[in-house]
Amino acid sequence: MYRLLGDPKIRDWCPISWWNTKMPPGLLALEARDAVAEGYLAHKIKARPWFDVREQVAAISDVAPENYLIDIDWNGMLRSPGEALPVLRELDQWSRIGLFESPIRQDDVIGHARLHAQSPRPLAEHFRKDLFPVWMRDDSLDAFVVFGAGVSGMMRQGHLAASFNKSFWLQVVGTGLTTAFTLHLGAVLSHATWPMVTGMNTVADDLIVEPIEIRNGLARTPEMPGLGVAVDDDALERYRVDTSEVPATPRRILEFDIGDGRRRYYADMLQLWRDCRDDRNMPVQPRHATLTLRDDNHSVEFDQIHQRLQRAPVWDMDLALPAWG
């Protein structure tokens, strides 16, 4: 496939990253061990107020080699440069930190310029064609996430980033099929030097017959015709589902312990997200924070509390809690 893209091939092996969404420190450490065992040397994690990012990075660092890279994505959860900078400076003490992705809101272009001038590590954002000219005018970012625009769109994003000597990683999430596709792009795009994120490590089956070779943090670009991999037809049948039937989301109560003895309760994750980022009611990255999920025990008490929380989050001092099972 790479021979169809118009640019010459410049690498046979492309950097690739293990990926995890929101997880407590202990689970991330187990993931890092798996990553190293499978040949990865980079790890992109999601940072959120409800887990202590310092503890997350420390847990990974305890089990990973010195050359293991940790890239951190906040999706804007640090909100503003003034709130973000102390956290970023704290994290700079860990040598394995690679870059900081989206610490503040993506459309805060003035904030990006202010933060970039003081950030101890490179700053990255998802490519946006409407904001790219402003970011480049102010030289307020170091790297980009190239994603979601089809082959021609991602090639164009890659070329624009390269024209300003900005590095990037390709982010196309899926199975082994998607990873093979992404490797062809990475083989020809000169500035695709940050480890690509395909999420292949999160699926039970890569859907291809022969696994993609990963060694020393690099994945080999396939050389066979087309994508260069053979689809596992048996796996396709084994995992086929009826998409007309969508299972209901389980009811849970979310307990956010902000680490100082106070707890706040939510009816769902979207409510928690809004309270932290959009409504700005919670600290951006409290120490020793934890999140506990309370499953529906089908009791009258659970139902009453859940109905109340659907109206608004509640602090523990305002909520009479039963003994959780």
Image (cartoon, grey):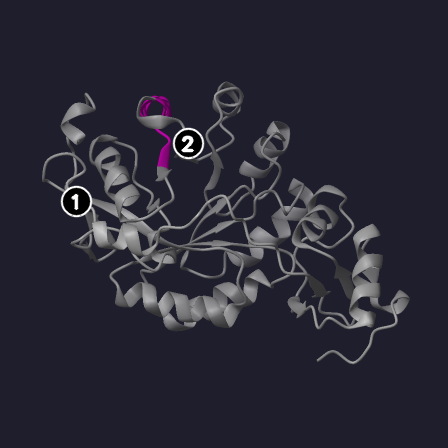
Which residue is the site of mark 2? 148
User: Which disc is residue 301 wearing?
Assistant: none
Q: Residues within 10 Å of mark 2 (few under 14, many from 20)?
A: some
Query: Which region is colored magenta?
Result: 153-168
- Residue shown at 67% from the left, 41% from the top: 80
- Occupied quadrant, residue 257: bottom right
Look at the picture and state if 277 lies above or below 132: below
- Occupied quadrant, residue 313: bottom right
Q: Is residue 3 left or right of residue 73?
A: left
Label 2 sits on a secondary structure element that is loop
- Residue shown at 34% from the left, 57% from the top: 201
Overall secondary structure of the magenta section: helix
Amino acid type, residue under disc 2 in the picture: Gly
* Quarter the C terminus occupies: bottom right
- The answer to which of marks 2 and 1 sits earlier in the sequence is 2
Task: Give percent across and percent down for residue 15.
Answer: 27, 47
- Occupied quadrant, residue 118: top right
* Quarter the N terminus occupies: top left
Residue 298 seen in the figure: yes
Task: Give percent across and percent down for residue 129.
Answer: 48, 21
Which residue is the site of mark 1? 229
Amino acid type, residue under disc 1 in the picture: Val
Look at the picture and state if 266 lies above or below 227: below
Residue 206 seen in the figure: no
- Residue shown at 49% from the left, 60% from the top: 93
